[in-house]
Image (cartoon, rainbow, N blue to C red):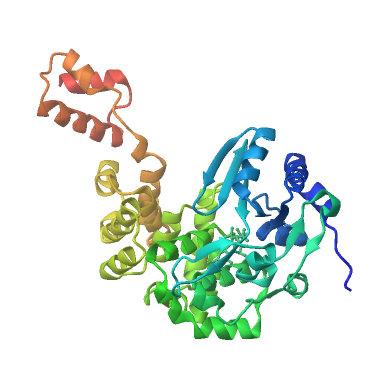
């Protein structure tokens, strides 16, 4: 019998005290109810790897909702329950814990969301994507911290390997193709030989996945530390072309992503900024195809379209001594992410400087006087007010007025 690994001290040291004590309380409660309770999935993998992860996923052999209700009495927070799925979420302060009733899944057809029925932990784990995600930890007080490793996840973790559990894994759920690529690059692991063969063989199964689900996978890619690595690998494997055949993960892209991260620091670049950069080289028709495939929300679709429109103005923006009001007129009204994408994408230093001036200063300028102030001076309300405000803005942009008094004098004139 292999030695049982106990992760109790890892739980106590790696998780914030509040989460570790909640795990103990939950294990005790479940035990009193005669139900098995386990910590599962990504957090177990990351505990073993010594990587920070506070997204706790618990599996209950029994009734997760009833347990969550009891737990919410100990730890007062927001409880959301999803009876249809037998799951619940408990949130308090900055923490959240997901509880799920152990379930087995059947896939009516490839790519569809699975139908589920209550089951055991073992069955719940055997429906999962990769061996490194199938480890679980006992939370029962008598076995607290004991590792359950039914699919040799620990060996694969040690050998830095991403391995599916069975031959049909990518057929059942082709989003795992993107997941596998993400894990490989995030953890610096490698897809095991047979897994890689299956992945390549099942790439066409991505056609069974809805645009919304593919978009979610892309969102996950963009939340990685270096999305360009996953995109490069996706290109190499023919997966990026499934998003759109015109997309490329070049060194140009990698460099632009890095600059985008510098811009956005300490936050990560937004989904729309990364996407605007990724699609920067695409023409209008290609972008429309991607917008429709990914069912992109209207504001993000607008960003991609704006980006194309701004690109066609780059020649106009690449002029020396362009009046600030002219720069403003060209760029005003476009999504900021589209403007930023052009700042990154443009080869012209002059255009870049003008765009930067807009982003850092011009877009925030407004006249001091408001429409109401103008009416108070006796100007009748109507289209004339708008015209005067526009003239004031123009004067302000071009540095002809700075103070309230300057503006009042200009209005008088
Ligand atoms: N899972 C799966 N197939 C999928 C999506 C998820 O088998 N298409 C399983 C995985 O075993 C995963 C668990 O569901 O561990 C939870 O999914 P998720 O929260 O997306 O993954 P994490 O393991 O928490 O990984 P990450 O660090 O990327 O969040």
State the quadrant of the C terminus.
top left
- Kindly tell me whether residue 252 is visible in this rendering: yes
Q: Which residue is drawn at 53% across and 67% down?
A: 228
Residue 332 is situated, as x and y percent measured from the top left of the image, at 28, 45
Task: Please state the quadrant of the image where ligand 1 appears.
Answer: bottom right
State the quadrant of the N terminus.
bottom right
Above or below 262: residue 308: below
Answer with left or right where residue 232 lies relative to residue 279. Answer: right
Above or below 269: residue 377: above
Above or below 367: residue 372: above
Q: Which residue is drawn at 49% across and 71% down?
A: 107
Nearest the camera: 216 or 375? 216
Residue 394 is situated, as x and y percent measured from the top left of the image, at 24, 35
Above or below 175: residue 358: above
Q: Which residue is drawn at 64% across and 85% down?
A: 193
Count of residue discs: 0
């Amino acid at each position: 019998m292999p030695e049982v690994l106990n992760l109790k001290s890892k739980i106590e040291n790696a998780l914030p005290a509040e989460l570790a004590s909640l795990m103990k309380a939950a294990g005790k409660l479940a035990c009193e109810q005669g139900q098995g309770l386990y910590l599962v999935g990504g957090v177990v993998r990351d505990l073993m790897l010594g990587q920070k992860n506070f997204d706790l996923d618990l599996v209950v052999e029994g009734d997760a909702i009833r347990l969550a209700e009891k737990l919410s009495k100990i730890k007062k927070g927001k409880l959301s329950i999803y009876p249809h799925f037998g799951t619940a979420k408990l949130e308090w302060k900055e923490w959240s814990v997901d509880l799920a009733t152990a379930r087995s899944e059947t896939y009516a057809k490839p790519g569809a969301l699975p139908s589920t029925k209550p089951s055991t932990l073992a069955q719940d784990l055997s429906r999962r994507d990769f061996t490194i995600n199938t480890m679980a930890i006992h939370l029962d007080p008598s076995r607290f911290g004991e590792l359950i490793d039914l699919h040799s996840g620990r060996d694969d973790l040690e050998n830095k390997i991403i391995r599916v559990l069975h031959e049909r894994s990518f057929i059942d759920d082709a989003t795992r193709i993107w997941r596998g690529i993400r894990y490989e690059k995030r953890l610096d692991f490698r897809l095991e030989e047979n897994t890689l063969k299956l992945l390549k063989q099942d790439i066409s199964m991505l056609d069974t996945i809805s645009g919304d689900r593919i978009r979610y996978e892309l969102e996950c890619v963009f939340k990685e530390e270096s999305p360009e690595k996953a995109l490069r690998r996706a290109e190499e494997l023919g997966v990026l072309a499934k998003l759109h055949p015109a997309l490329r993960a070049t060194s140009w892209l990698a460099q632009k992503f890095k600059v985008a991260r510098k811009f956005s620091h300490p936050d990560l670049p937004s989904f729309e900024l990364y996407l605007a950069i990724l699609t920067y080289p695409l023409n209008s028709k290609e972008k429309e195809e991607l917008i429709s495939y990914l069912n992109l929300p209207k504001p993000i679709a607008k960003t991609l379209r704006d980006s194309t429109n701004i690109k066609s103005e780059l020649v106009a923006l690449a002029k020396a001594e362009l009046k600030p009001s002219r720069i403003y007129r060209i760029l005003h009204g476009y999504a900021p992410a589209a403007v930023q994408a052009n700042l990154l994408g443009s080869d012209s230093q002059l255009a870049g400087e003008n765009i930067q001036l807009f982003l850092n200063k011009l877009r925030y300028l407004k006249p001091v006087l408001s429409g109401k102030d103008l009416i108070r001076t006796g100007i009748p309300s109507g289209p004339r007010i708008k015209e005067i405000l526009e003239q004031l803005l123009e004067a302000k942009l071009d540095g002809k007025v700075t103070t309230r008094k300057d503006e009042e004098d200009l209005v008088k004139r």
